[in-house]
């Protein structure tokens, strides 16, 4: 029902906020859960693939499983059209796996291309390196391999049999049912980049969602379901303090947490401290939900600490502002606070983890090993929870 860009027009990033109406779906969720969205493949890619393979997209067909050991009669709902199968059921964006490439290589009529494709799928060191460089690092998907190997002309039915199914994409829900019982909010960054081969690439789901702009005349129906996330839950006692660390779109579940705690407070319940550490590149370009967060801070619902890494001479990240407010974090931890991290697992979450240990060591006056054991104890008692991705 809503789809809007949260970044400024002069930002080089696009982060959109969309709202999915679940009023008629009888769907329930809790703050911290994930929403799974089944995307559609890019229609231009589907059209280009059909032209390359000389396929009539609206032709009806049925693909039957002949494997006696499988319980499925069809790999996806059949009968269907090639357009529907290539749009909804088959993953045509992911770099091709070696077993698929091996089966496709037999359809190359040029011996040099066939030899090259077979080498990519071999178990030799050279073959593995070539596959890693040419397919994985260059992010070559099916259409691009067909473009780069002109003699390769596999039958569409064999392709549909070989290719993996198009999977749902999971997003942290950016709302609370206490405030939004009939809608699920999603905050997602548009994935768009140039591959090593110089081609433009984009995220299947985010690029599709971005194009769905609702209006009074148009509305869109998208297939979704809720995945419960029991490992990322607010404390049972509302009076328990919480510390949230979520740069960028890692803010999403914390928006739901804050909405939930604000609703409890409006009901007259005792609510503990809500401390949020948020970071982004530029305050005036990609500070997500800035007006909301400032209002929550003015209303005394949250304590807000921000890091804008590109607005200062020395880059400042969430772990740096955690260090600056280490004593506050230690005080709240000693009061039983729950600590949450959401976002990038490879760098941010690791750095935040180390900073948390540093804070406990410094302000708790503990030996390093004791501080590390303190954090492990928090994890084991579900006081330290992560919702991270790589």
Image (spheres, rainbow, N blue to C red):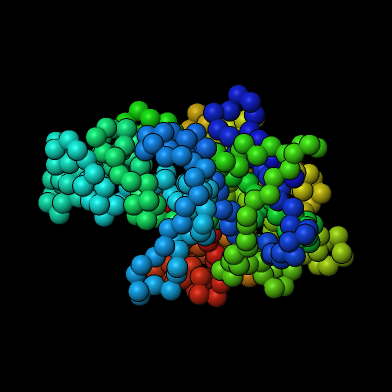
Q: In which quarter of the image is residue 339?
A: bottom right
Position in image of residue 365 (x %, y %):
49, 64
Rendered view: 31 above or below 200: below
Position in image of residue 270 (x %, y %):
81, 67
- Say left or right for 373 vs 273: left
User: How many discs mark residues in the rendered view?
Assistant: 0
- Say left or right for 334 vs 85: right
Q: Nearer the viewer, residue 292 or 26?
A: 26
Residue sitting at the far top: 10
Q: In which quarter of the image is residue 223?
A: bottom right
Instruction: Tell me which residue sits at (42%, 31%) in the image.
Output: 200
Rendered view: 127 above or below 15: below
Instruction: Tell me which residue sits at (36%, 42%) in the image.
Output: 141
Kindly tell me whether residue 235 is visible in this rendering. yes
Q: Which of 30 and 82 is in front in this view?
A: 82
Instruction: Tell me which residue sits at (62%, 36%) in the image.
Output: 211
Q: Nearer the viewer, residue 281 or 17?
A: 17
Q: Nearer the viewer, residue 306 or 253?
A: 253
Position in image of residue 246 (x %, y %):
58, 50
Kindly tell me whether residue 139 is visible in this rendering. no
Position in image of residue 121 (x %, y %):
20, 50
Instruction: Tell me which residue sits at (37%, 46%) in the image.
Output: 156
Image quarter of the N terminus: top right
């Amino acid at each position: 029902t809503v789809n809007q860009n949260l970044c400024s027009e002069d930002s080089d990033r696009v982060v959109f906020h969309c709202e999915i109406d679940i009023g008629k779906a009888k769907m329930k969720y809790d703050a911290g859960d994930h929403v799974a969205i089944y995307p559609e493949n890019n229609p231009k890619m589907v059209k280009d693939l059909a032209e390359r393979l000389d396929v009539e997209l609206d032709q009806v067909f049925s693909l039957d499983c002949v494997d006696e050991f499988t319980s499925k009669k069809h790999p996806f709902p059949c009968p269907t059209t090639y357009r529907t199968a290539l749009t909804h059921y088959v993953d045509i964006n992911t770099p091709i796996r070696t077993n698929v490439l091996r089966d496709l290589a037999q359809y190359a009529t040029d011996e040099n291309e066939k030899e090259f494709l077979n080498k990519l799928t071999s178990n030799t060191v050279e073959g593995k390196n070539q596959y890693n460089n040419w397919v994985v690092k260059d992010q070559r998907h099916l259409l691009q391999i067909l473009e780069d190997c002109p003699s390769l002309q596999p039958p569409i039915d064999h392709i549909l049999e070989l290719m993996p199914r198009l999977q749902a994409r999971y997003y942290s829900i950016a709302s609370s049912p206490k405030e939004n019982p009939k809608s699920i909010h999603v905050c997602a960054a548009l994935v768009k980049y140039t591959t090593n081969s110089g081609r433009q690439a984009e995220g299947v789901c985010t690029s599709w969602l971005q194009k769905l702009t609702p209006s009074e005349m148009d509305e869109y129906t998208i297939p979704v379901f809720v995945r419960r996330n029991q490992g990322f839950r607010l404390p049972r006692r509302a009076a328990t303090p919480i510390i949230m660390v979520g740069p960028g779109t890692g803010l999403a579940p914390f928006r739901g947490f804050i909405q939930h705690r604000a609703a409890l407070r409006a009901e007259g319940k005792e609510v503990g401290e809500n401390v949020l550490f948020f970071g982004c590149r530029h305050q005036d370009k990609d500070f997500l939900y800035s007006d909301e967060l400032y209002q929550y801070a003015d209303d005394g619902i949250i304590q807000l600490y921000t890091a804008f890494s590109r607005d200062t001479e020395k880059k400042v990240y969430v772990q740096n502002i955690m260090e600056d407010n280490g004593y506050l974090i230690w005080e709240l931890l000693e009061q039983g606070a729950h600590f949450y991290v959401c976002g990038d697992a490879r760098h941010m979450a690791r750095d935040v983890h180390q900073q948390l240990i540093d804070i406990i060591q410094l302000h708790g006056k503990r030996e390093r090993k004791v501080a590390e054991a303190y954090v492990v104890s928090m994890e084991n008692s579900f006081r330290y929870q992560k919702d991270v991705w790589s």
